[in-house]
């Protein structure tokens, strides 16, 4: 048997869930007195699954805790079978789990599971997303009047913005605190939730609808003045004050990168 | 191979110890990184990598090159590996003599090759390609194995010697892997080492394993076992001063315990080689 055929036989054995060793593979393998060929092959077979399951448990700890060992393992094995690892780094193994849940799980479990898996995956994404130098209060302290007029900002690269229909954040917090996880319930209105990395640590925060709209306006290219104008209808003459409070909060949280208009293109200040 | 690159005694760099390393500057001659852990956009891993490389020499050690795989070498992986090497400026770049990716799946294991002429030519052509891109010799490590292919017509150490002769690649001798495979497959670990071209051995690995009675698993989650220490001493007697690294990948002990193992490696080296041949 040629090298490529030998490797294909072993690959097929490892990647399928069936632990029965195909005779064609077994006849290629030399065991020893201490470790027969069947036992040696089983070590590789078991290690493949154990390694992948370990990564899934590590990347989705809240989902694991909510579902329990048995159900989570069943889900993870079905997922691995449908989406076997294709990236050289195990860091990407769980990337398609939310998508898999969408097609694999029936309601009423589907939606809250999908949201919890998505929330957990965004933390993985934020953890090692590209670095950026966020706009700081120190820098803004030195702003001239022209700087305020020309100020444009976007979200730093690690930010994931989620709109959650369920009490997913509460479920996640309870799982993280290792206390009883509340039942999944549908919220009366969608909740905006940001996940990002600040000073090497992953963060999250929820936003009230008006704050979310203001942040969306600013990071879609709006100016500080346009944000104040937008808030007039809800905050009246307090709108500049409210805009300043929120802006300070976003900057303290390290959420924004200043963009600077040079010619016709925007430049993002990155490390 | 010049001994001017002899780095002394190092530890695997793991995130569990980042803070301690920067705060305490422990007496470790060098650190070895798992290359793939730093092929990321940003964040904690790259932050500490940049800080620690200012203080210590680094070596890159990969697990995903799949130098013996049936697929084409992953161009994106190689590009990222080269970028990382440009950033880290490592003393050398290592991976394993194995395959870890099949034609359709990443298998995320260090799978053994059949040691045949066909495999030798296959791996040699890929080593040359990688070396051309990295612009440096590749260092390849013997792996722990739980099976052998019946078609093998030479030992793993003979294969490594032939491969090194054909391509100029260098060898990372993992003494624990030799011991684990020798117990599982019933060969003489000392003969394995003697079959390696000592002038091509760039580095030694030491690690712990789990003993299941009639077989061993290379788990890197235990202290280094007595027979592995003994084999290390014999290997040094044959090789002379050789850069030595201790790997720990799970059940992480207090950092002082790893430093104590490193001291033991220094002592064995000093005893075997004599005070006149220091390993630093």
Image: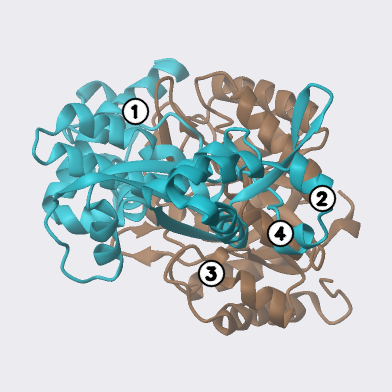
* Front residue (pair B70, B43): B43
Q: Secondary structure at mark 2?
A: helix
| Residue depicted at x 68% and y 37% | B81
Chain B, colour shown: brown
Q: Residues within 10 Å of mark 2 (few under 14, many from 20)?
A: few
Mark 2 vs mark 4, CA separation in Å? 17 Å
Front of the two marks 2 and 3: 2
Please state which of the two labelled residues, at mark 3 or mark 4, is closer to the viewer: 4
Secondary structure state at the residue bearing disc 3: helix
Dot 1 and dot 2 residues touching (CB under 8 Å): no
Choose the circle earlier in sequence order: 1 or 4.
1
The chain carrying label 4 is: A
Decide which of A251, B42 is in the foreground and name it.
A251
Quick check: A27 left or right of B75? left
* Colour cyan maps to chain: A
Rate crowding at label 3 as few (under 14), some (14 to 19) or many (20 or more) other CA atoms within 10 Å: few
Residue under label 1: A10
Q: Earlier in the sequence, mark 1 or mark 2?
A: 1
Residue B196 in view, yes or no: no
Q: CA distance from mark 3 to mark 4?
A: 30 Å
Q: Which mark is residue B16?
A: 3
For residue A40, above or below residue A67: above
Both labels 2 and 4 in a single chain: yes
Which residue position holds label 4?
A136
Residue picked out by circle 2: A145
Q: CA distance from mark 1 to mark 2?
A: 68 Å
């Amino acid at each position: 048997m040629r090298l490529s055929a030998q490797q294909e036989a072993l690959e097929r054995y490892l990647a399928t869930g069936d632990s029965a060793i195909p005779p064609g593979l077994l006849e290629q393998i030399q065991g020893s007195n201490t470790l027969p060929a069947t036992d040696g092959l089983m070590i590789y077979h078991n290690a493949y699954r154990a390694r992948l399951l370990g990564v899934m448990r590590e990347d989705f700890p809240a989902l694991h805790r909510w579902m329990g060992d048995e159900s989570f393992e069943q889900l993870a094995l079905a997922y691995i079978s449908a989406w076997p690892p294709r990236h050289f780094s195990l860091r990407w193994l769980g990337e398609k789990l939310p998508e898999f849940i969408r097609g694999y799980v029936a309601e009423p479990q589907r939606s809250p599971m999908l949201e919890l898996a998505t929330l957990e995956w965004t933390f993985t994404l934020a953890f090692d997303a590209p670095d950026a130098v966020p706009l700081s209060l120190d820098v803004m302290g030195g702003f001239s009047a022209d700087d305020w007029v020309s100020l444009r900002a976007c979200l730093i690269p690690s930010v994931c913005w989620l709109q959650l229909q369920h009490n997913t954040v509460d479920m996640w917090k309870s799982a993280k605190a290792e206390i009883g996880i509340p039942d999944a319930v549908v919220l009366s209105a969608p909740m905006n939730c940001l996940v990002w990395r600040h000073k090497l640590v992953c963060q999250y925060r929820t936003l009230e609808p008006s704050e979310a709209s203001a942040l969306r306006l600013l990071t879609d290219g709006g100016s500080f003045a346009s944000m104040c104008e937008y808030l007039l209808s809800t905050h009246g003459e307090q709108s500049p004050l409210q805009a300043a409070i929120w802006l300070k909060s976003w900057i303290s949280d390290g959420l924004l990168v200043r963009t600077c208009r040079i010619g016709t293109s925007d430049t993002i200040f990155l490390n | 191979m010049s001994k001017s690159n002899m780095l002394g005694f190092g530890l695997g760099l793991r995130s569990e110890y980042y803070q301690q390393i920067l705060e305490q500057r422990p007496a470790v001659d060098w650190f070895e990184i798992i290359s793939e852990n730093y092929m990321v956009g940003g964040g904690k891993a790259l932050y500490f990598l940049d800080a620690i490389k200012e203080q210590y020499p680094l070596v890159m050690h990969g697990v995903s090159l799949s130098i013996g795989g049936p697929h084409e070498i992953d161009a994106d992986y190689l590009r990222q590996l080269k970028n990382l090497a440009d950033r880290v400026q490592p003393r050398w770049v290592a991976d394993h003599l194995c395959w870890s990716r099949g034609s359709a799946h990443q298998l995320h294991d260090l799978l053994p090759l059949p040691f045949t002429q066909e495999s030798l030519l296959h791996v040699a052509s890929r080593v040359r390609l990688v070396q051309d891109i990295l612009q440096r010799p590749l260092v390849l490590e013997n792996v722990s194995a739980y099976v052998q292919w019946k078609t093998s017509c030479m030992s793993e150490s003979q294969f490594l010697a032939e491969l090194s002769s054909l391509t100029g690649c260098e060898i990372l001798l993992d003494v624990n892997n030799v011991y684990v495979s020798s117990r599982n497959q019933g060969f003489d670990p000392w003969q394995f080492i003697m079959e390696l071209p000592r002038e091509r051995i760039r580095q030694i690995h030491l690690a712990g394993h789990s003993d299941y009675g009639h077989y061993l698993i290379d788990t890197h989650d235990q202290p280094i076992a007595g027979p592995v220490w003994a084999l290390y001493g014999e290997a040094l007697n044959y090789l002379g001063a050789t850069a030595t690294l201790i790997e720990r990948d799970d059940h992480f002990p207090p950092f002082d315990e790893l430093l104590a193992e490193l001291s033991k490696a220094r002592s064995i080296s000093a005893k075997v080689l004599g005070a006149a041949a220091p390993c630093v």
